[in-house]
Image: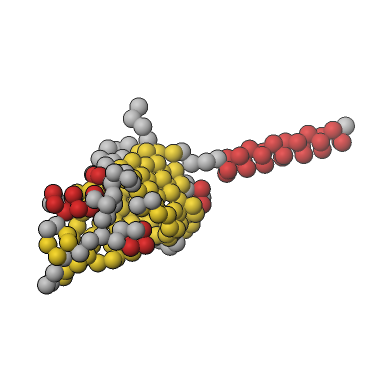
Amino acid sequence: MPGRGLVVLVLTLAAVSVTRLSAADEAPATLAVDSAASQVAFTVFTSMIFKSKQEGRFKDFKGEVAYDAQNPAATRVDLTVYTASVDMKNRDRDDMLRSPDFFDADRFPTLRFVSKHVGPLHDNMLSVTGDLTIHGITHEVTVPVSIDALTSSSRRPGPAFSTTFQIDRTEFGLNGSPKFSGFNISVAKNVQIHLAIVAAPPRP
């Protein structure tokens, strides 16, 4: 019967459309941040008589990345950094940064970034907007992120990203002290954050 054939054709096309829609809407796989191949670092300028660049890093952090190259809007990032792991290769400075004058690591043991929106920027670049929480204070930030590679240092397939952006530490309650590392050193308000993140699937 011609009518029956038409019904079968319509149902077949509908099933194909649903299958394609489901595939398009499928969430990307969530990968763990490979801390051995990643870095969370910062740069701040200090001055006493002369201006000096000081560099540091956090040794302990974890996170998850779900990256979809075909649909950047589905990409998700969640990064947690442990403030007590701050390392400027100077015990006095590290203790000062852990103190209530800065990170107050006992009260606020973590800082965290959680993405809210991800979109394409330009060649191999993404624009990532999310909530950054430091010292218990949350602000929305938008940062440019470079897509560096799709393999990890451990040779397991996974994306790699990097970004450098600037924050005003005083907006997060990191008001600091004029006395830094045992000297009367002025610490700049602006701090550059450097992230190099590699995500990789679990080992088999």
Locate the N terminus by quadrant: top right
Residue at 29% in and 38% down: 155
For the residue pair 176 and 194, the one nearer the viewer reads as: 176
Residue at 37% in and 35% down: 201
Counting from the top left corner in percent of width and height, residue 72 is at 48, 52
Counting from the top left corner in percent of width and height, residue 183 is at 12, 62
Position of 78 with respect to 16 (left or right) is left
Counting from the top left corner in percent of width and height, residue 65 is at 41, 44
Whether residue 5 is visible here, answered yes or no, is yes
Position of 198 with respect to 24 (left or right) is left
Q: Quadrant of residue 168?
A: bottom left
Residue at 44% in and 43% down: 66
Residue farthest to the top? 204
How many labels sit on residues? 0
Up-down relation of residue 89 to residue 44 (above or below): above
Position of 3 with respect to 53 (left or right) is right
Locate the C terminus by quadrant: top left
Up-down relation of residue 102 to residue 52 (above or below): above
Up-down relation of residue 15 to residue 84 (above or below): above
For the residue pair 101 and 187, the one nearer the viewer reads as: 101
Residue farthest to the bottom? 49
Whether residue 46 is visible here, answered yes or no, is no
Identify the colour scheme used. secondary structure
For the residue pair 6 and 153, the one nearer the viewer reads as: 153
Residue at 77% in and 39% down: 10
